[in-house]
Amino acid sequence: MEAFAESAYQAKKKGFDALELHGAHGYLIDQFFWDKFNKRKDKWGGTTIAVRSRFATEIIKAVRNALGEDFPIKLRLSQWKQQDYIAKLAKSPEKMEQWLLPLSEAGVDIFHCSQRRFWEPGFENSNLDFAGWAKKKLRPNHRISVG
């Protein structure tokens, strides 16, 4: 946590206007979200997405503390894996809410929703993609970007 916070602080000190944490595509934070990868038995593991998100929320809290309330934090997330394009981290809108709300409460301002096929719905029988569902499940003042 400290290394993330210190790096964020140094970026702000160097004049950056915002910070993006990469929590997708197999990077460290992403590995903790997925039950197939995160088999830990300590406080960083767990059977639910909300519990497995604890690692990310603690990083975000530390970064928020280092940057202050007025410095934008962006978090890149993905529902899919490079090895499995149809994988879904959150298998329902309710699971997505359990995943995203703790991250929001920890201090994320902007969710960068990566979706390989942006024209496909985020969930069956829906016309919303990943970004659309994220926007629907989060506070109205959150910004959502797609990439």
Image (cartoon, rainbow, N blue to C red):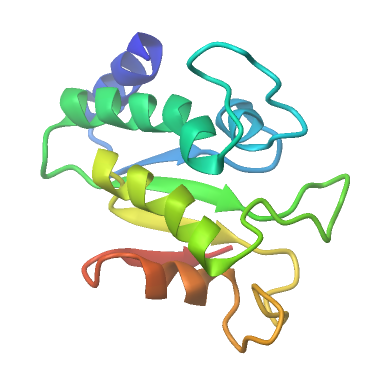
Residue 27 position in % (x across, y down): 64, 31
Task: Give the camera-side residue of 10 and 39.
Answer: 39
Q: Quadrant of the N terminus?
A: top left
Q: Work out whether 89 lies above or below 49.
A: below
Residue 77 position in % (x across, y down): 55, 50
Residue pushed farthest front?
A: 47
Tell me which residue sits at (35%, 56%) in the image.
110
Tell me which residue sits at (12%, 33%) in the image.
68
Q: Relative to 54, is 128 on the left or the right? A: right
Q: Relative to 115, is 17 on the left or the right? A: left
Q: Relative to 140, is 27 on the left or the right? A: right
Task: Give the camera-side residue of 70 and 86.
Answer: 86
Task: Give the camera-side residue of 97 and 71.
Answer: 97
Residue 17 visible? The answer is: no
Q: Relative to 58, is 26 on the left or the right? A: right
Q: Work out whether 118 lies above or below 109.
A: below
Task: Give the camera-side residue of 2 and 140.
Answer: 140
